[in-house]
Structures are given as C-alpha cells and as structure tokens.
Amino acid sequence: MSSRQPITRPTGAALDLVSADSLAPGDLVRVFNLGFSDYLLPMVMDEAALADHIACTDIDLACSRVALDVEPVGFALAARRGNEAWIGGMGVAPAYRRSGLGARTLTAALEAVAAEGADTVWLEVLEGNTAAVALYERLGFERVRRLEVWSLPPDPGRDAVKPRALDVDAAHAWIAGHRAGREPWQRADASIVRMRERDTPLVGTAVVRSGQIAGAAICRLDAATVRVLQIAAVDRAAGRDLVLAAAGELTLRLANVPGDDLLSGVLPRLGADLTAAQHEMRLQVV
C-alpha cells in the first residue's frame, strides 16, 4: 500500500487557469494537440476523437483545467468515477515548458477532483518520459505496475484460428468473472458501458474448449485494425488461440496489458511488437 500524500501547490507561471468546460471544443482540441505536438508517440485528435475520449472515459470538464495566456497553452484532463479519478491527458505548449506551468495546471485539476470526493487518482505515463515521471513523483504519485502496448501485424503463414462470435454482453460477463486483475481505466467496465451507450461498434469473440468458453475478448474494429478492449483466458494456450481468432487477417492492437498478464508471454511468441510501455501511477489524496 502506498502512503497517503498531500497535494501540494507548486509555483509556476502566472497565467490564468480555467475549467475546461469554459472552452469551445475546437479550442480544447487545439491545446490538446499543442501539448502533444512533440510527444514520444504521435498523438493527434480531432473534435470527434476528443469528444469520444471525453465521453468514454468520463472526463469531467468542470474539474479539468486549462492554462490561458490569451490562447490556451496547457491543460490537464481529469476523469471521475465514484471516489476514483484519472488523468486522461496533460500537456503544455513547448514554449511554456520548464516554468512550473504543467505542475500548476495538474495540481489545480487534482484539487478539483479531490473537492468532489476523489481519494485515489490514477494515470499512465510512457517509461521514456522521464520529465513527466519526475513531475508526478514530486506530486506524490507512486508507480503501481508496468503496462505494455502491443501490435500484432497480419501474417498469412501463421496458424489461423476460426473465431466464435459471442454477444458483447456475454463476453463482458465472462471476462468479468475470469480477469486476473483490475482493468486499466480506459479498458475498465465503465468505459465499455460508455462505448455501448454511444453505439460504438464492438464485437465479442470467444474460444471454446470441451464445450466451454476458455477465453473471450471485446474488440473495436476499423477498416484494417482490431483494437482489443478487454480480454481474458484460462491459460496461455487459450490466450494464444483467442488472440489469433480476434486478429483474423487484420492488425491487432492491445494497449495497457499488465506486464504480469499471461498475454505478455503469449504476444511476443506470436510475433507481436512491443510498441510502448508505461508506468501506471497512483496518488492517494489526503
């Protein structure tokens, strides 16, 4: 268990901080893309994608904060679910960095979610983003576990496993009863519920052994990619077959896989690429 840390207010640039719900959607998209303009991994949003992110992860724009210097130059998006919160993105325009503005903006968002009853705040940060890791640790966040991002390209020479369609509700229920640990925020049950409320096209896939489900996945499809949202299997063999069944002839992407999950042993053996690794971090708010 981590020790409980108070949220302290750092000093920083004397710019106005406002709630994100005071901005027009286009302005919020612009500051998001500005903050991620030279990120370690490409990340660009349009209004539709940011609206989907806000809705599906329960971003609270009233608690989220934006730094203004005539135009928005920094932001911290904060989501809330019950007594838990999550930082769904933060960034500062390159010209305003190393001034304390990022810490100031994030602290304001942390204080806002704490005022609404959040006692635990989560976030993920790329392992190579050492400046951000140092900032979060100064604010009291502690590393909890490693999360991995995998990409499995199609391979005509690989064994094919015929998928078995499964109702999304049934897949969700099976996964809930067989998952090995807590789902990261973006893959949590509440996120799946929000996607379904927005009529996001999801499919359920299963593998069966001796007449019983041995693994199930919920996936989001686009023209060339299968994005796995939730997945669980009874063992590595079932996990392997499930990944192949879900992928079919498309590229499969699976984000935020806990480093100790059985899939972390399955995916590299199938030829998947580890495209990124993150620290999941937690702050216990006093």
Image (cartoon, grey):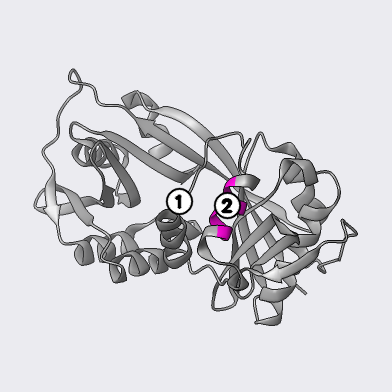
Q: Residue furthest right?
A: 11
Q: Is residue 33 above or below residue 86?
A: above
Name the residue rendered at 59%, 72% in the picture: 21
- 32 magenta-colored: yes
Quarter-of-image position of residue 171: bottom left
Residue 13 visible, this orientation: yes
Q: What amino acid type is highlighted by mark number 1?
A: Asp
- The tally of labels here is 2
Q: What amino acid type is highlighted by mark number 2?
A: Arg
Q: Is residue 151 above or below residue 95?
A: above
Quarter-of-image position of residue 175: bottom left
Front-lying residue, 133 or 170: 133
- 232 magenta-colored: no
Main SS of residues in magenta? helix
Question: Disc 1 and disc 2: Cα gap in Å?
Answer: 9 Å
Query: Residue 17 appears at what percent x and percent y?
Result: 76, 67
Query: Residue 7 appears at what percent x and percent y?
Result: 81, 67
Residue 181 visible, this orientation: no
Name the residue rendered at 19%, 50% in the picture: 205
The answer to whether the residues at label 1 and label 2 have Cβ atoms under 8 Å apart is no
Name the residue rendered at 64%, 73% in the picture: 63
Left or right for 40, reference 44: right
Q: Which residue is mark 2?
A: 30
Q: Residues within 10 Å of mark 1 (few under 14, many from 20)?
A: some
Secondary structure of the residue carrying tag 1 is: loop
Front-lying residue, 7 or 160: 7
1 or 2: tag closer to the N-terminus? 2
Left or right for 231, reference 206: right
Region of the chain picked out in magenta, as a range: 27-33
Query: Residue 30 appears at what percent x and percent y?
Result: 57, 52
Q: Residue furthest front?
A: 70
Q: From the image, which quarter does the N terminus lie in? A: bottom right
